[in-house]
Amino acid sequence: MKRLTLLALGFAVLATPALAQMRGQDPFADADVNRDGQITIAEYQASRAARFDRLDRDRDGIIRMQDFPRIAQRGDRGADLERMISAADRNRDGALTRQEMLASPPVAFAMADANDDGVLTAAERDSAKARLQQMRSARR
């Protein structure tokens, strides 16, 4: 179960502004809007919405594999992107809408929120990032 959660966190990382830099990206970057050192679930959801908007290059409200032809052809990165889309694609049409993404569980947030209080502290974020890095190192 823990491995599945770590894999889910890894997939959550994919929804970043620059898919070209998928690996190593902080899933919580830019989420602390009020810069108080903590990220609430509302801040994280707003960050997810903004990430979707950046990934939706043609502004049609949908993310598809064909929107990223170079990434789709790159083995593990293409497979990671496809899994990210599939994980949240509720109607299984191969396309991820903004609504589907936002309705999907915020797995990275839930995994990092060690005390389940709906707020991520810097220590919780650092711990989650360290676990993700360990998972990546183990895959190599």
Image: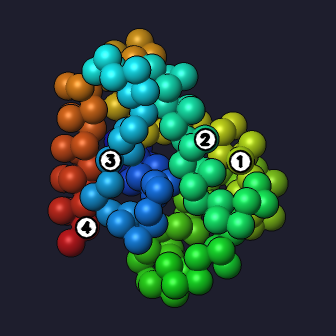
Q: Identify whether 67 is placed above or below 30.
A: below
Q: CA distance from mark 3 to mark 2?
A: 16 Å
Question: Which is nearer the N-term, disc 3 or disc 4?
Answer: 3
Per the image, the residue denoted by label 1 is 98
Question: Which is nearer the N-term, disc 3 or disc 2?
Answer: 3
Residue occupying the point 58% across, 36% down: 105
Is label 1 in a helix, a strand or a loop? helix
Residue occupying the point 71% across, 47% down: 98
Q: Which circle, 3 or 4, is nearer the viewer? A: 3
Q: Is residue 68 left or right of residue 140?
A: right
Is label 2 in a helix, a strand or a loop? helix
Per the image, the residue denoted by label 3 is 26
Work out which quarter of the rendered image holds the N terminus and state it.
top left
In the rendering, at what x and y percent does residue 134 appear?
19, 53
Is label 4 in a helix, a strand or a loop? helix
Quadrant in the rendering for residue 42: top right
Question: Which is nearer the N-term, disc 2 or disc 4?
Answer: 2
Per the image, the residue denoted by label 4 is 139
